[in-house]
Image (tube, helix red, strand yellow):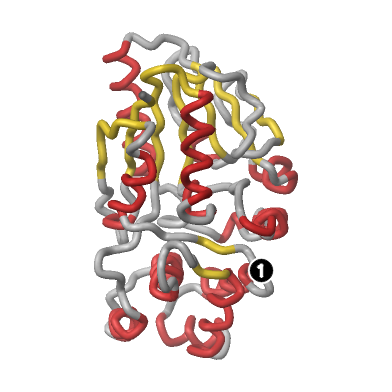
């Protein structure tokens, strides 16, 4: 997952310029798991075979290393776009597929010619955008750069319907039914979000965590989660950027005007029911 480029107030810039410092501590479901990459590789390969798409031109939103270095169809010409200098310089993988390029740019004004992409992909992209306008703006830009019938493939973060409450989340944690802090943090983010249009401010997540647990040391001791994982909550401190977590129906609604959904698959890892991989074709 990398940085979005259509947020209100531009606060996500500061967050993502520092996020690379925490990147090595972040694990699934916040980053794609091996199962997510296997699903993405399989679905893209099937789509290319079915459409007779050879040497596809592919665009990656962000610099997600797992996607940049995955097994792409033979001859894929991959370009990644990210606005964060820190993410580009420190996270873009050396083992990205041969010939891959990374560009500095805005997702809302991609430095990519209209109709020049066969495939666009990314990880958790929409959750970094304001809802609904940011979603619509990105969908419009992706429809511009994709060829007619081109593929948009992504893993999304969606909240359940009805949303999980804080009380329910803490009961699950205290019962030992949440296996990792990374899953807990994502569920905490979603539980704190009043609605998708409001989203949840990162500093508010940090403040809520500190009110609940005092500091990472106490929660790590209580749960036996690694302290290095729990300490990643401090990446949110003083950050004004917001995350948004739509329901699956809300996300589909924002894309339905420009794209036709052709697949939706859910992984079987912890919290996988909130991390589907979706495939859409541009109309």
Q: Is residue 18 left or right of residue 267?
A: right
| Disc 1, SS | loop
Q: Residue at x 39, y 38 (%)?
A: 37
Residue 273 visible in the displayed image: yes
Nearest the eye: 144 or 266 = 144
Could you tell me which residue is drawn at 40 percent across and 81 percent down? 223
Question: What residue does disc 1 label?
Answer: 239
Q: Residue at x 34, y 27 (%)?
A: 281
Relative image position of residue 267 (x, y in whole percent): 28, 49
- Decide: is 200 above or below 79: below
Residue 85 position, x and y percent, is: 74, 44
Image-based side of 70 in relation to 158, left or right:
right
Q: Is residue 3 visible?
A: no
Q: Is residue 148 above or below residue 95?
A: above
Pick whichever, 151 or 196, lies toward us.
196
Residue found 38% across the figure and 11% down from its top? 53
């Amino acid at each position: 997952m990398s940085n979005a480029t259509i947020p209100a107030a531009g606060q996500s810039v500061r967050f993502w310029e520092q996020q690379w410092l925490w990147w090595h501590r972040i694990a699934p479901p916040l980053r794609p798991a091996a199962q997510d990459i296997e699903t993405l590789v399989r679905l893209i390969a099937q789509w290319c075979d079915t459409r007779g798409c050879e040497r596809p031109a592919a665009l990656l939103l962000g610099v997600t290393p797992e996607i940049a270095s995955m097994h792409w169809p033979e001859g894929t010409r991959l370009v990644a776009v990210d606005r964060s200098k820190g993410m580009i310089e420190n996270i873009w993988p050396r083992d990205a597929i041969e010939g891959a390029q990374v560009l500095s740019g805005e997702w809302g004004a991609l430095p990519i010619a209209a109709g020049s992409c066969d495939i666009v992909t990314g990880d958790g992209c929409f959750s970094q955008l304001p809802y609904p306008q940011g979603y619509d703006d990105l969908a419009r830009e992706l429809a511009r750069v994709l060829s007619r019938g081109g593929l948009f493939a992504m893993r999304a973060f969606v909240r359940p319907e009805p949303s999980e409450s804080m009380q329910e989340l803490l009961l699950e944690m205290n019962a030992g039914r949440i296996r990792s802090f990374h899953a807990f943090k994502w569920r905490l983010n979603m539980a704190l979000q009043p609605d998708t249009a409001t989203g949840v401010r990162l500093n508010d997540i940090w403040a809520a965590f500190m009110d609940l647990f005092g500091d990472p040391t106490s929660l790590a001791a209580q749960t036996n989660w690694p302290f290095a994982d729990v300490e990643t909550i401090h990446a949110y401190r003083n950050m004004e950027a917001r995350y948004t977590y739509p329901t699956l129906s809300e996300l589909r609604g924002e894309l339905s005007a420009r794209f036709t959904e052709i697949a939706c698959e859910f992984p079987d890892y912890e919290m996988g029911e909130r991390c589907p991989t979706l495939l859409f074709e541009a109309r």
